[in-house]
Image (cartoon, rainbow, N blue to C red):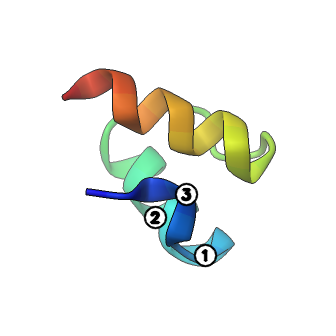
Amino acid sequence: MDYHSLSRKELQALCKKHGIRANTSNATMADALQSLN
């Protein structure tokens, strides 16, 4: 999945679901989610 194409709101929701801090930049959140896979 390409997390970098998601909106900020979608990234924050996914981060919260996975226990990742959701108050960082979009790129940081996308990279963190990418590293889960």
Q: Which of 8 and 34 is in front in this view?
A: 34
Marks 2,1: beta carbons within 8 A: yes
The residue that mark 2 highlights is 13
Depth check: 33 or 17 in front? 33
Element under disc 2? helix
Q: Which label was assigned to residue 9?
A: 1
- Badge 3 or badge 1: first in the primary sequence: 3
Residue 37 in the image, given as x and y percentages of width and height: 19, 29
Query: Disc 3 marks which amino acid?
Result: His
Q: Name the residue under label 3.
A: 4
Residue most extreme to the left: 37
Secondary structure state at the residue bearing disc 1: helix
Q: Earlier in the sequence, mark 2 or mark 3?
A: 3
Q: In this view, does 7 lie above or below 3?
A: below
Whether label 3 touches label 1, CB < 8 Å: no
Vertical relation: 28 (above or below) 27 = above
Residue ID at (53%, 70%)? 5
Q: How far apart are marks 3 and 1 (CA)?
A: 12 Å
The residue that appears at 80% across and 45% down in the rendered structure is: 25
Question: Mark 1: few, some, or many residues within 10 Å (few <14, many ≥20)?
Answer: few
Q: How far apart are marks 2 and 3 (CA)?
A: 14 Å
